[in-house]
Image: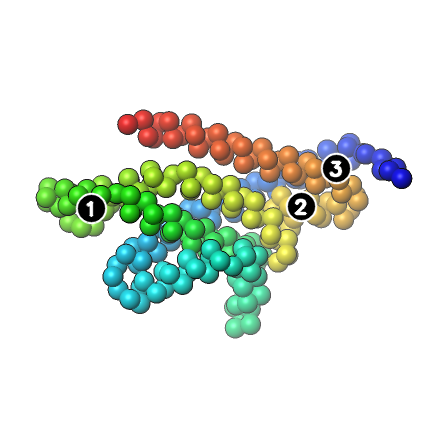
Amino acid sequence: MFNYTFQWNQALARLPQMLDGALVTMQIAILSMAIGVLLAILLTGCRLSGIRVLQGFAVTWVEIARNTPALFQIYMAHFGVASFGIHFSPFTSLLIGITFNNAGYLAENFRGALKAISDTQSRAGRSLGMTPVQAFRYIVLPQMLRIAYLPMTNQMVWAILMTSLGVTVGMNSDLYGVTQDLNALTFRTFELFAIAAVIFYVITKVIGLGARLLATRLFRY
């Protein structure tokens, strides 16, 4: 028989701690995206370089990132490399795992975006006296990022949700980890995780709305 007694006051009293955890969640997600975008640009360059070794490296990274569970990637960053005497903190392992995943997905998005840009764009830059690097930086790269903007927004949301996997490697300072610890202390499972779900939902919705508003300013023309 259903006889559960809700005690929202106990859960809401822990809201400040959960919000502190949400800040750590955002920190990990933002760092993983910032580093992931830079790595994805490098991987895209390797993929299109025509050099077999670099192409193989980029393809291997993308295939692993896109075709294995994110949990596996986080585990390898924490437990896998520990077999070789390399030890990372839970925070660092989670950041590495999510960054690896982000870079793989974004590299494929960037490659698709580049294919949508005509080669005449780069040639036009060269005709103006630009070097190949300058033509890519000032002409091709801005267009590539514009085309890949919405997939990047989706990846940011996914990065936020992936932070919840950090609890499997001992991460307890992010939103999910804090909620897990509070649950062990109070046993208010439904209330605490319901509040955590609302916080995750609000964060992702704010990011989506902010991204759309930013797009209207960045891509007006």
Element type at mark 1: helix
Residue position for label 3: 191
Residue position for label 2: 178
Q: Quadrant of residue 186?
A: top right
Q: Amino acid at mark 2?
A: Val
Relative horizontal placement of residue 46, taking residue 168 as reference (left or right): left
Q: Earlier in the sequence, mark 2 or mark 3?
A: 2
x, y percentage for residue 59? 37, 61
Q: Quadrant of residue 71?
A: bottom right
Can residue 63 be spotted in the picture?
Answer: yes
Residue density around tag 2, few if under 14, some if 14–19, many if 20 or more, within 10 Å: many
* Cα distance in 3D space between marks 2 and 3: 14 Å
Q: Amino acid at mark 3?
A: Glu
Is residue 164 shown above or below 68?
above
* Colour scheme in use: rainbow
Say which mark, if any, is on residue 179. Answer: none
- Where's the N terminus, which quadrant? top right
Which numbered mark, 2 or 1, is in the foreground of this view?
Answer: 1
Residue position for label 1: 119
**How many numbered marks appear?**
3
- Residue at 31% over, 67% down: 53
